[in-house]
Image: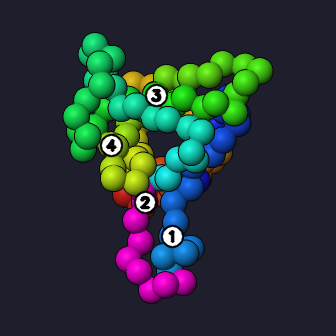
């Protein structure tokens, strides 16, 4: 799942359905019909060619009473069915629900080295 408190709509991958049909997993996030995404170059914020990594811009028409567009600090690649997240822009702060899991994994990795 990809979502933020600032947006009304979330994007999901179809792995539960794919697993049920014994299809290989994919981590492509599928956007609802009322959402548009754009992948932008980090230096000039111009759209990149499909398949190239860049910063995810998210346009959600369900946000009728608040901001329509969000320029995230997430790196993504546009795919045929939506987009794949590939990480955060270097130097940006960690955000979201997975921070605790990231910290736990980091502490486990540090503990293994000592």
- Marks 2 and 3, the one that precedes in the sequence: 2
Question: Looking at the image, do the residues carrying marks 4 and 1 touch, with CB atoms under 8 Å apart?
Answer: no
Query: Where does label 4 land, which residue?
Result: 77
Residue at the spot 40% in from the left edge and 54% down from the top edge? 81
Q: Position of residue 40 (x, y in %)?
A: 33, 26
Instruction: Tell which residue pokes out farthest to the right in this image.
Output: 65
Q: Which mark, by number, is residue 27?
A: 2
- 23 is within the stretch colored magenta: yes
Does 71 sit left or right of 97 as displayed? left
Does 16 sit left or right of 8 as displayed? left
As rendered, which of 92 and 74 lies closer to the eye? 74
Query: Where does label 3 land, which residue?
Result: 57
Q: Position of residue 72 (x, y in %)?
A: 49, 27
Instruction: Give residue 91's quadrant in the image.
Output: top left
Q: Give the magenta-colored segment's residue range.
A: 20-28
Query: Where does label 1 land, which residue?
Result: 15
Q: Position of residue 114 (x, y in %)?
A: 40, 56
Give the Cα distance between marks 2 and 3.
18 Å
User: Which element is circle 4 on?
Assistant: strand
Question: Looking at the image, do the residues carrying marks 1 and 2 touch, with CB atoms under 8 Å apart?
Answer: yes
Pointer 2 local density, CA inside 10 Å: few below 14, some 14–19, many at least 20: some
Q: 64 above or below 3?
A: above
Residue at the spot 33% in from the left edge and 17% down from the top edge? 45
Residue 106 visible in rendering: yes
- Marks 1 and 2, the one that precedes in the sequence: 1
């Amino acid at each position: 799942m990809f979502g933020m408190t600032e947006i009304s709509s979330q994007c999901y991958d179809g792995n539960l359905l794919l697993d049920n049909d014994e299809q290989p997993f994919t981590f492509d996030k599928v956007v609802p019909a009322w959402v548009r995404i754009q992948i932008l170059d980090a230096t000039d914020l111009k759209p990149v060619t499909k398949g190239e990594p860049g910063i995810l811009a998210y346009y959600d028409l369900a946000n009728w009473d608040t901001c329509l567009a969000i320029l995230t600090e997430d790196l993504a690649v546009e795919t045929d069915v939506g987009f794949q997240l590939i990480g955060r822009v270097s130097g940006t702060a960690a955000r979201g629900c997975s921070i605790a899991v990231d910290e736990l994994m980091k502490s486990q990795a540090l503990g293994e080295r000592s």
